[in-house]
């Protein structure tokens, strides 16, 4: 028996399970799965770049599916590049732009961007790029005054998330875009809208960003497919080489089944957009209020009200440690993630939580919970009933001290 098998056996199966770790992994909606299945077993599995009947048939489907995905963004389907993940889309936005525009050497990002943006920008130091990191307030909102100060004639790109994936801050993207373009129309603006797609309205015909990242599995579509909106006139180069394909910026054999699932997930999420998000927001507020009022020494991370993503709950529990919290939650059938990132055996606090002023021990003691259309009020009630016991047990182990 492997160590992992032994751990699972020791863990056992809880009497009830509530999955709230949608940030890090997800199932596909049952209707999405039904939509994908024929593309593995029946027709329309051909390569859309090949000129024969089954290639043309797949290409026809391909363009219709991209039209469905483009609709809620209010953009031309031809402006969408499909990739294999949102991290690839973010890399393509930053690196692909730099490969086409070599004169300017400054990239500006906020300190709470996803690591696929921050690490990509910093990795370009070797190519003589300067990276400016813009600070945020204690609720995670980017400082627009400092952004304005940092923009100059050498600035190539500003990248700012629409919604922070960890603490749910809805960023002032429209205002930031206006600041950038008022300074210099030729500066490119990218937004990572991965956590916003399906949660808040996005209209890139009105808010004219140059580049926007979005993906499938955050709306219960399949993993392995994402997108990058590229405004007309914005030129990128592919960041890797591959074979002949429809997607010239992600040269590979297209996967019709994944695209079918992505399109179906978009259809479901946006047909009942208001209903889904109103219900999610109701569950979010119940969970936030219930956890804060029933457990002492807690701090909510991120903003409140309409400036917070409708699916996001992030709370620091003083006197607790994140990894112990996630294990204890798991023993109770509550699946969440912590504000600690375990890398190379060194437990590091979340860069986002430290950016908003949390001490390392406060960041380590935080839990992230996300909600979607599969979660129910009954599940939230179960979490509210169990979490005070979880926190009490962890604090009893540490003696209740501030770690």
Image (cartoon, rainbow, N blue to C red):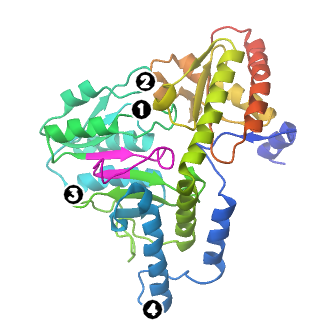
Residue at 62% of width from left, 34% of height from top?
282
Q: Is residue 311 visible?
A: yes
Q: CA distance from mark 3 to mark 4?
A: 34 Å
Q: Quadrant of residue 50?
A: bottom left
Most frequent secondary structure within the magenta stretch:
loop
**Mark 1 secondary-structure assignment:** loop
- Residue 161: x and y in percent read 39, 40
Q: Is the Cβ of the residue at disc 3 closer than 8 Å to that at disc 4?
A: no
Q: Seen in the image, is 191 located left or right of residue 189?
A: right
- Residue picked out by circle 1: 112
- Does 326 appear above or below 361? below
Label whose residue precedes the other's in the sequence (4 or 2)? 4
Tell whether position 204 is magenta. yes
- Does 392 appear above or below 83? above
Q: Which mark is residue 355?
A: 2
Residue at 79% of width from left, 26% of height from top?
386
Q: Quadrant of residue 251?
A: bottom left
Label whose residue precedes the other's in the sequence (3 or 4)? 4
Kindly report which numbered mark, 1 or 3, lies closer to the viewer in this rendering: 1
Q: Nearer the viewer, residue 196 or 286?
A: 286
- Residue picked out by circle 3: 100
- Residue picked out by circle 4: 52
């Amino acid at each position: 028996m492997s160590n992992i098998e032994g751990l699972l056996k020791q863990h056992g199966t809880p009497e009830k399970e509530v999955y709230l770790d949608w940030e890090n992994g997800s199932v596909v909606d049952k209707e999405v799965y039904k939509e994908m299945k024929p593309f593995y077993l029946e027709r329309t599995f051909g390569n859309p770049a090949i000129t024969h009947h089954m290639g043309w048939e797949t290409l026809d489907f391909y363009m219709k599916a991209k039209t469905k995905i483009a609709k809620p963004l209010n953009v031309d389907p031809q402006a969408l590049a499909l990739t294999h993940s949102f991290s690839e889309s973010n890399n393509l936005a930053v690196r692909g732009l730099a490969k086409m525009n070599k004169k300017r050497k400054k990239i500006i990002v906020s300190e709470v961007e996803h690591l696929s943006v921050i690490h990509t920008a910093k990795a370009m130091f070797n190519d003589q790029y300067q990276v400016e990191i813009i600070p945020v307030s204690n609720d995670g909102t980017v400082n627009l005054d400092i952004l304005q100060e940092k923009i100059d004639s050498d600035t190539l790109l500003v990248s700012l998330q629409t919604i922070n994936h960890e603490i749910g801050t809805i960023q002032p993207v429209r205002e930031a875009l206006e600041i950038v373009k008022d300074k210099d129309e030729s500066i490119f603006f990218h937004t990572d809208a991965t956590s916003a797609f399906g949660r808040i309205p996005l209209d890139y015909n009105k808010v004219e960003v140059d580049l926007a990242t979005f993906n499938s599995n955050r709306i219960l579509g399949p993993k392995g497919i994402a997108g990058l909106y590229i405004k007309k006139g914005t030129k990128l180069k592919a960041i890797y080489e591959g074979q002949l394909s429809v997607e010239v910026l992600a040269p590979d054999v297209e996967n019709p089944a994944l695209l079918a699932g992505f399109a179906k997930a978009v259809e479901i999420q946006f047909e009942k957009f208001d209903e889904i998000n109103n219900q999610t927001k109701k569950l979010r507020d119940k969970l936030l209020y219930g956890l804060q009022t029933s457990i002492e020494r807690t701090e909510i991370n991120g903003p409140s009200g309409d400036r917070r993503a409708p699916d996001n709950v992030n709370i620091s529990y003083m006197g607790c440690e994140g990894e112990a919290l996630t294990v204890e939650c798991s023993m109770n059938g509550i699946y969440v993630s912590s504000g600690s990132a375990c890398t190379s055996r060194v437990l590091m606090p979340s860069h986002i939580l430290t950016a908003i002023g949390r001490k390392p021990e406060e960041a380590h003691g935080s839990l992230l919970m996300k909600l979607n259309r599969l979660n129910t009020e009954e599940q939230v009630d179960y979490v509210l009933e169990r979490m005070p016991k979880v926190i009490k047990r962890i604090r009893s182990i540490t003696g209740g001290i501030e770690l």
